[in-house]
Amino acid sequence: MGVRCDVTDPADAERLIAVAVETGGPHLLVNNAGGWTAGSQFPVAPASAWAHTLDLNLRAPMHLTQLALGPMERLGGGAVLNIASSAGAETTPYGSPEYGAAKAGLIRFTTALGDPARIGGTRVTCLVPGWIGLDRAHAELAAMSPTERAVAAPLIPPAQVVAAALDLLSSGAGGTVIEI
């Protein structure tokens, strides 16, 4: 069943989890929404623009996880998968500092939850992919100079990300962070 939801809107997030509960769940939660506002980034962008990036990439997954843990516990546990980004694990300059900071926070949020026994038997794991080979990434790569392309990280096939996500959902230990 599809449910339209703005994950940054607390009322929408609550409605989403309520629909899942009404239909016998949730058993799984995949926090995959992400991105940043096009245009200027921190420090040039106004606080409202970069605050939205933090809301989308960190606060929304935290809120949805918080909302899902109780219902998952009543079902005997579940699995939460956070999709972060290598932007949150790297230590080099990045074009969207707010996005990198939010994804770093999501990685740490995952590891901080750790032991499923502490949170009602739900496993919380995190996938940290590099540059995923989606249309936008292919366009960005094509727009680079030959020198930039030569040093750019290889694009990760989307199917590889899906396979890693399914593996973590089915067998990952709580607090696990996997980089691909």
Image: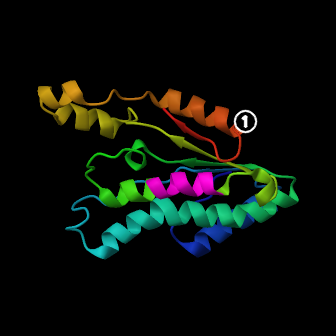
Of residues 68 and 24, the one drawn nearer to the viewer in this rendering: 68
Residue 141 showing in the rendered view: yes
Identify the residue at image location x=22%, y=60%. Answer: 39
Q: Residues within 10 Å of mark 1 (few under 14, many from 20)?
A: few
Res 74 quadrant in image: bottom right
Asked whether residue 6 appears in the rendered view, the answer is no
The correct choice, above or below, for 138 with respect to 12 in the image is: above
Residue at x 34% of width, y 46% of height: 91
Q: Residue at x 31, y 37 (%)?
A: 137
Could you tell me residue 30's position as x and y percent?
Answer: 62, 49
What's the magenta region?
104-112
Looking at the rendering, which quadrant does residue 141 occupy? top left
Residue 115 vs 146, above or below: the answer is: below
Residue 38 location, x and y as percent?
27, 58
Location of residue 73 (image quadrant): bottom right
Is residue 110 magenta-colored? yes
Type of secondary structure dominating the magenta stretch: helix
